[in-house]
Amino acid sequence: MYDWLIKGGTVVSGSGSRIADVGIVADRIVEVAPSLSRGDATSVVDAGGRLVLPGLIDSHNHPYYYDDLESFSYAAAHGGVTTLMSFAGRPLNSPVTDVIDMVDEFIRDGEQRSYLDFGLHVILTPADDPLDVLAPLLDRGVTSFKIFFAFHRQKRMFADDMALGLMQAIARVGGLCMVHCENGLAIELLEDQMRSAGRVSVSDYVASRPPQLEGEAVYRALSLAEVAGCDCYVVHVSTAESVDIVRQFRQRGGPARYAETCPHYLLLEDHDQIRIGGRAKISPPMRTATDRDGLWQGVLDDGIDIVASDCSGQTCVAKHHGEPNIFDVASGIPGVEQFFPLIFNEGVHRRSVPVEMLVKRVCERPAEIFDLPRKGRIAVGMDADVAIFDPAQEWTVRAADQHGNSDYSLYEGSRVRGRALWTMQRGRVVLDDGAVVGPAGGGRYIPRSVRGDASTSSN
């Protein structure tokens, strides 16, 4: 006897698709097979003609700024996401400054108000002593730690010696080092030169962060990680060259090397950045059509492990819409609820990318890399995290229709084919006929363990 039976859909995994039914009891998948009996189920969902996907995992997001975890998870749930891997951050106007207190506050708030299950990454700064912070963060189930090679020396930017020392410490405890790869010192010089010359337009911002300075930083981060014996995850890769560098390091053996890209790099180009203006300011900036093609090739051939949103709740006011100096505009973009439909539309419908590869990038690899052992696949024993996705439904992106606190979209007016209609998390319906039915606080925090088999699966 099943509590839920999902009938007649195309069940998708990273290795293939098949018409099958999914039987669920309580919070787990108990059977996946053709022609399960309707009479054995309390509730039946007809998925005929639609895709039955594992609940989507957004592996990189920032639910602070003008969204908190409640509003951000509410928006994400509308796009078929069932699990968030979020960066714990300090909400606006929060008095909390200690990184451990920040994580404790984030977990408490999320367990009370998140619509979705969530795990955490933590951003470390040069002021955080590994001897002080790593052990208590591991005790709280946080095993992935992000550092920056850019953004203000003495504030966020790690010098090479500090980065190497931290990577050594992370390697000793079995953690994962995530790195924002841009050469911050060179970028500061270029920005200062442009400001002095009065060159403060969007095109000047793009020119101040050239692709070579990302590639150099990717090579440096992976080199330091190799010396430290530390698994390394390069966030938001934007260039084809960076993907090639990751491939090169993987051929050498040693620690794991992972690469992530994001929808804005797969969908937009540098001329779109200039057209949209400050609201699209993100770091690294959008690149060329050649880079877009190279990133999609990485999605196809495992050069890219994960596609994640890197979204945050941003507003036009917060982005200083109309600000004449682009360098004074904050970075960050919204769009978590559109991220999977948009890459599905571009990848499957326009580029003939198999949907299986998107499931691998958005469901399976995130679960493997970030130690979510019951997430990411539709299989017996897994959490009943399921998304029914209509690959043919057409709709138009409108900021007025989106959820959360963001009031604009980079994709305003875009026609999209493909939409999540129904989702379940751990046997509980979250999205029904395109509307979130909640409840807030229904999500759970997922503490994670240190590195296991995932560290060997990408090399």
Image (cartoon, grey):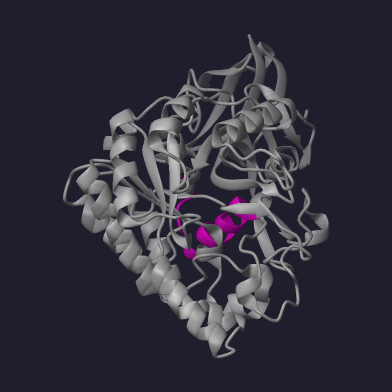
Which residue appears farthest toward the bottom when viewing the image?
A: 197
Q: Nearer the viewer, residue 212 or 335?
A: 212
Left or right, residue 10 beside residue 402: left
Residue 422 shown in magenta: no
Q: Is residue 357 visible?
A: no
Start-end of magenta stretch: 338-357
Question: What residue is shown at x 42% (from left), y 24% (from top)?
Answer: 449
Q: Nearer the viewer, residue 33 or 227?
A: 227
Quadrant in which the C terminus appears: top left
Residue 313 x %, y %: 70, 52
Residue 444 x %, y %: 63, 24
Question: What residue is shown at x 22% (from left), y 58% (from top)?
Answer: 248
Left or right, residue 382 beside residue 104: left
Above or below, comparing residue 154 to residue 173 in the picture: below
Question: What residue is shown at x 46% (from left), y 41% (from top)?
Answer: 128
Left or right, residue 379 beside residue 386: left
Residue 351 shown in magenta: yes
Residue 405 x %, y %: 78, 51
Above or below, comparing residue 324 to residue 99 in the picture: below
Q: For residue 353, what is the image quadrant?
A: bottom left
Which residue appears farthest toward the left when viewing the image?
A: 252
Would you say the magenta stretch is mainly helix, strand or loop?
A: helix
Q: Is residue 228 visible?
A: yes
Q: For residue 104, what is the image quadrant?
A: top right
